[in-house]
Amino acid sequence: MKAIILKAPRKLELREIPNPVFGEYEVLCSIEASAVCSGTDRHIFNNDYPFKVNFPVVIGHEAIGRVVACGKKVKYFKLGDLVSRINNRLPEGCGINLLWGGMAEFGIAVDWQAMKKDGLNKDLWKKFTANRVLPNNFNGVTSTMIITWRETLAFLKRLNFSKGKKVVIIGSGAVALSFLCHCRNFGIKTVIIGNTSRIDKFISCGANSFISYKEKKWRGILRSSIFSDIHGIIDAYGDYQMLNRLIPILNSGAKIGLYGLNYDKNNHTIISMARSDVSFHNGLIYDEGSVHEEVIKNIFAGQLKYSDFINSTSIYSLDDYKTAFKDAWSGRVIKPVLNFSKK
């Protein structure tokens, strides 16, 4: 099968590699699309991920696939099902490593519900609960957004902001926009600190205010606006310097969501300046599968819209993968998606 290989830091290539191997509780999927994550994928691309990257590696953690074969103990998936969060497993000794491995023509999903029903230890299946069958009429390309929406919703619910609270979101990419949409749906007021090239998009999606990250007087703007009381911060970018500047003006008892990966390296810098009455929540801890049904319900209700994130200019053929990554890093599009069936 074809796969996008990161053979060394910042060196991508499209290469033929062996097909996946799948077990008795797993399904083989033809991957329909895989989105580029401008956070995680970029850290791996630059080899500054929180843990060591073993090159060459197949990346991609936002893949959607169609079931083409089932292991003998599979009960809850069937041929033709569209499944979220496809990962991979390659034959031993093939010389290719995986970080999820969704940027390939084929991948696997785990029938964790069958494993649970058969009494297998929870530790064997709990990390696969994001492998879910999607509704029949869903599109594989746009459905890549479901993964980001589930991740961000699961994390936001950990923070447990109540309706009417005021929250600052740092960032202006797909993750920040997802947090904004969830906050809007919960009745949480938001101000965005981000790139003003996205101001129209964020305001149209419900942001109460937008401040440029280059603005020198933003702290005064916050104090004099409806955000004079700030109950929380969600940092979707990973800018600890910006966060340190915000901490002094937070309400007592405020919550800070550290969603940007930079915090694995810089968390000590934030904590050293934090107030004792402010709590921190690490973004790498959330249960994506737990909010699957809620996200699907919000899609049907029109409260989460693919068109706010993905359009015709952000969908790329597999052969055009280098442009997809370039556009992700430059911010030209909000969410680049590789369409594996697009020629």
Image (cartoon, rainbow, N blue to C red):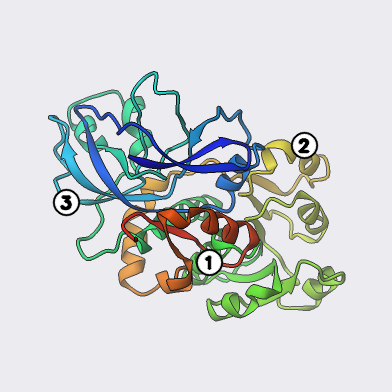
Residue denoted by label 2: 268
Residue 305 sits in quarter = bottom left
Q: Is residue 32 visible?
A: yes
Residue denoted by label 1: 183
Judged from the image, the secondary structure of the residue bearing numbered disc 2 is helix
Mark 1–mark 2 Cα distance, whole angstroms, equals: 28 Å
Residue type marked 2: His
Judged from the image, the secondary structure of the residue bearing numbered disc 3 is loop
Which numbered disc flags the more N-terminal residue, 3 or 1? Answer: 3
Image depth: mark 3 or mark 1 in front: 3
Q: State which quarter of the image contains the N terminus.
A: top left
Mark 3–mark 2 Cα distance, whole angstroms, equals: 48 Å
Left or right of residue 188, residue 141 in this image: left
- Please provide percent x and percent y for residue 342: 34, 61
Q: Is residue 117 above or below residue 77?
A: above
Q: Determine contact: label 3, label 1, CB under 8 Å.
A: no
Q: State which quarter of the image contains the C terminus.
A: bottom left
Residue at image point 47% right, 57% down: 320
Residue 172 sits in quarter = bottom right
Disc 1 residue crowd, few under 14, some 14–19, many 20+, Cα 10 Å: many
Judged from the image, the secondary structure of the residue bearing numbered disc 1 is helix
- Please provide percent x and percent y for residue 251: 74, 60
Residue type marked 3: Gly
Q: Is residue 269 above or below residue 238?
A: above
Badge count: 3
Residue type marked 1: Cys
Which numbered disc flags the more N-terminal residue, 1 or 2? Answer: 1
Residue denoted by label 3: 80
